Image (tube, coloured by chain):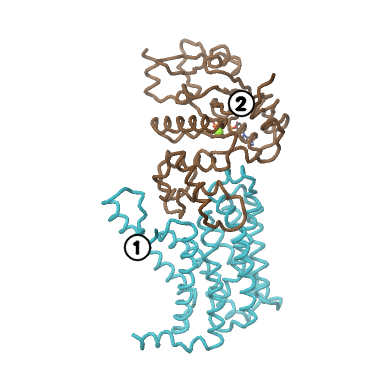
Chain colours: A cyan, B brown
Amino acid sequence: MGQFLQMVFPLDLITLPFMFHALLSGTVVAILSGLVGFFVILRGSSFVAHVLPKAGFAGAAGAVLLDINPLVGLVVFALGGALSIGMLGKRGRHDVVTALTLVVALGTGALFLTLNEHYATGAYALLFGQLVGVSLSQVLDTVVLGLVCVLILGVLYRPLLFASIMRDSAEARGISSRKLEMAFLIVVGLATAVTVPVVGALLSFSLMIGPAATARYLTRRPGTSLVCSVAIAILTIWAALVLGYDTSWPIGFFVSSISALLYGVVRVGASLQQRRVAGKTDAHVHPLDGVVGQK
Amino acid sequence: MQVEHVLELNDIVVQFGQRTVLDHIDVAIEAGEFVGLIGPNGAGKTTLLRVILGLLSPNHGEVRVDGKSVRKRNRAIGYVPQKIHLDPDTPLRGRDLVGLGLDGHRFGVPLPSRKRRARIDEVLEAVDALRFADAPVGRLSGGEQQRLLIAQALLTDPKILLLDEPLSNLDIRSAHEVVRLVGRLGKERGIAVILVAHDMNPLLGHMDKVLYLAEGHAAMGEVDAVIQSEVLSRLYGYEVEVLRVRGRVLVVGGRDEEADVVDLLGGFHCGDHEDVMNS
Ligand SMILES: Nc1ncnc2c1ncn2[C@@H]1O[C@H](COP(=O)(O)OP(=O)(O)OP(=O)(O)O)[C@@H](O)[C@H]1O
Ligand SMILES: [Mg+2]
């Protein structure tokens, strides 16, 4: 067993600088994805979380073309996408503008890639996530942006929860759901910008949706659900990074398949548990009560 | 001497484009009064609630709460939305939902405290919802969710409670329970209640006054004074008739013998309709 572990995850892996950097920024990204994902699912805006990474990808490709820091391009485009979705959408409905944002993003991304002939490997890393070549300064950028997002989410937690669940009542209590929505979209944009370099634009939203969706089957409390979501995201990314190192397959592949697997297992477990519980008592009992051991 | 009114609407006009939805509405409600706001679809019931809540500023007129003119949102007004749409797996217990009424508008993360829990338990008990307070909200029945929403609105100690069609998703028994609950809370706590409903029958015997809205006009008073063929005909601007059958009220359009009975309130089911025809 110990030998096997040593083979999959040699402890001195952490002492490799690039692995250390990847694990560090991966952890920040996971915390952020877990938190943001909770609200993304609550608000039913998975489509937005799917589209913004593609906008970020186009931005990064453009930044490389102009020979500036790709993170700048990522942030500008992901934020630009978030803001346009927020401003053009009406009363919480923005699937049409989101779809248009996706099309525009993919179009410009294709153009930037074509204009830049030597960028194929970089583009591959941006699309599917990369393990090597994360520099310390990139890690610091990730940490700073991540902290900003976590801070904003912490401050907005209650009104955002309120407005996501019952918009009219929240407005009647003086909460501006419009401003909240803009603030939230900005956070999603920033979170996207830091996630894409690690997990890749195509699959980064699986880290936002997967763990948060899985956490819903583990608890009925919002706070606990947030914590579970973050924990699952961290485990997912660590496993993905280590497996990515072992196999040199893309990180995005591991992140998405591990999230999907966890979701599947937990969901099946929850419905089995519920069937058992439903036979015994009334339906209000949560399926995993005994398992997670609350109360 | 003038009676102190907890809520006054003075000469309210609301227009959407060319359409006047509320046409010079005057309403005055006393503390502890239970008012049923009745009217056909599109009469402007929700619009009137939005004006009172400060979510919509009227083209003309003013809202006074406790004698003071209000423009902005007001803590003295509790609002109970018709229904919440949550999927069954939403990680939110009944008490979490109710707690949002206490501090959901504040920034930051809620810190559990004994006092917070006690206040939430107090309103949960008042609406008889302690039984399912720890169940996921998305899995509760419409009537159970309605109780939680009422509890949430009670947490700010409102002077006025507005309920927009709380009965529309409920079966007859739950509807009666909710009406009785709201009536009792209003009397116990001196809260003025405005409850919007299509069908006034579940409210008969519980509401103190009826506020009838039609074609932009309003009539308010005791049920027997307002629910009269002449009064409602004047509101609608055409002939309507009030039928009383076995202690229930039915408002129908026109005196035309040939025409089908048109149920203006949409609150009667087929079975009731046949009752009317046969009797
Ligand atoms: N924001 C708006 N813009 C334009 N028209 C509106 C707006 N809000 C309401 N209306 C119109 O005002 C009228 C009154 O609407 P309101 O929702 O107040 O009716 P209601 O009495 O609540 O009806 P229902 O019983 O169907 O809920 C309707 O004809 C509606 O189309
Ligand atoms: Mg309405």
Vertical relation: A280 (above or below) A259:
above
Subunit bearing disc 1 = A
Residue B137 location in percent, x, y?
44, 48
Q: Going by the image, does A220 lie left or right of B4?
A: left
Residue A211 location in percent, x, y?
46, 65
Residue B127 location in percent, x, y?
46, 38
Q: Are marks 2 and 1 in contact (CB under 8 Å)?
A: no
Q: Could you tell me how far apart the alpha carbons at marks 2 and 1 are, in whole angstroms? A: 53 Å
Question: Viewer-proximal residue, A118 or B43?
Answer: B43
Vertical relation: A60 (above or below) A134:
above
Q: Residue furthest left?
A: A279
Please name the amino acid that badge 2 sits on.
Glu
Which residue was labeled with disc 1? Answer: A291
Vertical relation: A35 (above or below) B120:
below
Asked if disc 2 is less than 8 Å from ligand 1, the answer is: no
The mark lying in front, picked from 2 and 1, is 2
Ligand 2 shows up in the quarter that is top right
Please name the amino acid that badge 1 sits on.
Val
Q: Quadrant of residue A153?
A: bottom right
In which quadrant is the C terminus of chain B drawn?
top left
Q: Which mark is residue B30?
A: 2
Residue A42 location in percent, x, y?
51, 55
